[in-house]
Image: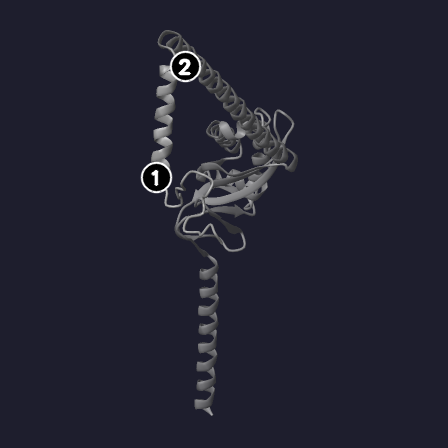
Amino acid sequence: MGSSQAAVSFLTNLARAAFGLGAAATVLNASLYTVDGGQRAVLFDRFRGVIDTTIGEGTHFLIPWLQKPFIFDIRTRPHTFSSISGTKDLQMVNLTLRLLSRPDVSRLPYIFQHLGLEYDEKVLPSIGNEVLKAVVAQFNADQLLTERPHVSALVRESLIKRAKDFNILLDDVAITHLSYGLEFSRAVEQKQVAQQEAERSKFVVMKADQERRAAIIRAEGESEAAHLISDATSKAGMGLIELRRIEASREIAGTLAKSPNVAYLPGGNNILMALNANR
């Protein structure tokens, strides 16, 4: 009987010790939190509110129930959004902007108090659209292409300055896509067609002018040749004409002699050779 009571007492003490160790482990686990690489923590205290200190990487202690950590990712993250904006000449363009942003680590408690953990989703789309519309309104539609580096620089400077008001740092800002409305695209196409037609008309006019000049020069040359021949004829008689006629006849005879399809027939009325006339 005594041994059974001792065993029960031992088991009871063991259960109490196990319960105490479990409770201590639970409290210890609730008192620790870990901040991974590329992260920072902001601690909220139920009595003091948000503590104005940013907690770095590693394992840290807190008071269970009284304090609660909120983890921020401070690594650079990409954001992409589109905006339809009006240009100075009242054309609509569709722009796509890509940002690389990260929070100002020293201002994380302020960001948490005023914007929360989703600070970038709340701020960047609105200020991005605002800056794009303000910058695009300063240029005509065609200038957005011809002066794109200048437009990108203005957007970058304005957006970086605007984001700093919300304690957000921008590492890069780039316009990745630019497209025009249907009416402007059709107008550009019609302008290109008109320019091609104008160039073609200019070529036709230049060709006609060259042909006219060539005709004038050819007529002047023929007139000068006729004048020279007339002078030579008046001075030397018809000998020059006969000489030209003989040269032309020689050239024709030489050409015919080289042709295999030319046959020479004797003169006279009887042009049929080897034919008996008595038949």
**For the residue marked with disc 2, what is the amino acid?**
Ala
Q: Look at the image and tell me whether residue 48 can be seen.
A: no
Residue ID at (34%, 40%) = 258
Q: Can you give x and y, in whole percent of width and height, for residue 111 in the image?
A: 53, 39
Image location of residue 135, percent across then percent down: 56, 27
Q: Residue at x 45, y 42 (%)?
A: 54
Q: Secondary structure beneath disc 1?
A: helix
Q: Quadrant of residue 25?
A: bottom left
Identify the residue under disc 2.
Answer: 225
* Mark 1 residue type: Ala
Disc nearer the start of the sequence (2/1): 2
In the foreground, 265 or 231: 265
Nearer mark to the viewer, of 2 and 1: 1
Q: Residue 106: give x, y in percent of width and height.
A: 44, 37
Residue 209 is situated, as x and y percent measured from the top left of the image, at 51, 19
* Color theme of the render: one colour
Residue at which label 1 appears: 257
Q: Residue at x 50, y 28 (%)?
A: 146
Residue 265: quadrant of the picture: top left
Query: Mark 2–mark 1 contact, CB under 8 Å?
Result: no
Q: Residue furthest bottom?
A: 1
Q: Nearer the viewer, residue 5 or 136?
A: 136
